[in-house]
Image (cartoon, grey):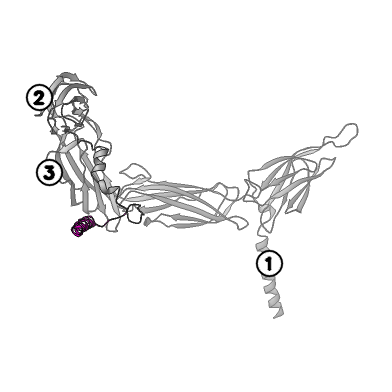
Amino acid sequence: MFRKTLIILLMVFFVFSFTASAYTLDDIEWSESKKTATLHWGDTVKSGEKNDDSYDTYVIKAEDFTKDGFVSLSISKDDEIKEVGFIRNGQSFEYRDEEGGQDIKISATDIKLNIDGWTGNMEDPTAKIDIRRRGVPEFDIDIKTEKDPNTEKDNEYDPRSGTYPNEIITTITVKNDGDAEAEDVEVIIEPSGMELAEGDLKNTMLSLDKDEVAEPIEVSFEVPHLWEETDLDLKVTVRSKDINGDIHEDTEEKELTIFPKSELIVTKTILEELYMDETAYVSVVVRNHGLYTMNSVTIKDTVISSMELKDSVTLEKTISIAPEETIEIFSYALKPIKPGKYTSPIAVATFKAPEGETYTYESDDDTKIEINGPYIVLKQKVDKTNVQPGTEVKITVTAKNEGNRDASTRVSSTDFPEGTTFVSGDTSVDKVLGKDQSASYTYILKMNDEGTFKLPAATATFIDMESYKGEKISNMPEITVKIPEPEQSESSSSTSNPSSDSTAQPGTESNEEVVEPGFESIFAIAALAGVYIAIRRRR
């Protein structure tokens, strides 16, 4: 019994000892990259700082030099000396970190003792050294996808084509371009929601030597059927262990653009150049470029601000449209209102997918329209709007061409309101008006009678070199004529209320005696009665 127990304990010890010392210095593949330093006596240099974040930091110190060409170098970690080596040019020594696997190798490439010929002493000896760390595996991952026959690109896929196979055929190549062998290698593929058509999403291999390229991994995915154009990231991760059992991982991604399974193509056509006397015909057409019927599609259009509809048309409609079906939604005519350069408003189609998302499709937004021709703007202006009878008022009539073509223009005022008299001035003008040019005339009317007078409209007729002609009517300003009310004087206002000053206000005292109304006549009668009685007694 004791013997069996001893054997088991020895086996356990052997396993743990093997795990802790799974490799020796002879098994290590050292990194190709190195750090070079020149150390004077007592100098130190660090390995594993800043850009070497994957390594612990060691401090290498030049402890001593000997006249026979050796340098003593110490390797410290966490202020504790781990190893001391005596080496000369071309030699090296290593430290095997059995606990953390942070192995390090120091090589002497150029030791200079600088021995003085007279004294035989060394003067400022130096040692140039190379520092290497234990190599680890790293992976170069290449993701190749075959071209879609429809797009002729290897990263854009359109499910709407009838070309087969409608799949994304993918080849993944992995190379170990690190400094050491990789063990227990896993290749993990994340397809970003795409359905796997063929192959495996996880592939394994026992090992991959330094600079070795693994057998290509082939896998295929079905092209997703989505309602809108979507970018998906095909992600490949390679994970492995190194000689110490540490995990190393590298990742590569390839972005794939997936076109929608159904898409509305909205086309709006309109004449891009026309004259003011021409008609612009508009057509809005919708095509379902896809694999599925799209129900309850609402299309809206808008009229350009410089035009107006010639007929009554409702520019909103709801339809259902089958795969690859084309429907003309609107067809209408527009009449130009004003010359200039404009951008046609876009037509918009909206569709609510069965999943609840709403998608919007628009026609081109850069259709430019140029409308040519003259555009005469006619205005009347008066210098006074409220006057007394007999006042003279100045009226100015101005015509301006706000279009982009010259026009021969005649402007005239032919009628005047009753109750007014023409005094002086001009009542017409003839002139060829170019772009942004104006012509005007002024006349004076005397306002004779009271009342509100509306000036008759001035009229402008024009014609251009294209024989486009027309007539414009001006505004009609109003003039109010009336006699002002006489102003009241201060004396008349004070006599109109003679008792206002003598009447005491409530809550105030007055020095005058207040007599009730009617008492004056009673006193007078009493006085007369007294006189009468006195005369009678004398008799």
Q: Position of residue 428 (x, y in %)?
A: 14, 20
Q: Which sits in the foreground, 277 or 409?
A: 409
Is residue 538 a member of the stretch shown in magenta? yes
Query: Which residue is labeled 2 in the image?
Result: 414
Q: What is the residue that sits farthest to the bottom in this orientation?
A: 1
Query: Label 1 amino acid?
Result: Phe
Q: Is residue 321 visible?
A: no
Query: Which residue is labeled 3 in the image?
Result: 312
| Whole-number angstrom distance, CA of label 1 to CA of label 3 | 97 Å
Question: What residue appears at the point 22 percent right and 52 percent down from the top-left corner?
Answer: 297
> Callout 2: helix, strand or loop?
loop
Q: Quadrant of the N terminus?
A: bottom right
Q: Which sits in the foreground, 498 or 428?
A: 498
Query: Which residue is labeled 1 in the image?
Result: 14
Reply above or below: 362 against 380: below
Magenta range is 513-539
Prevalent SS, magenta region: helix
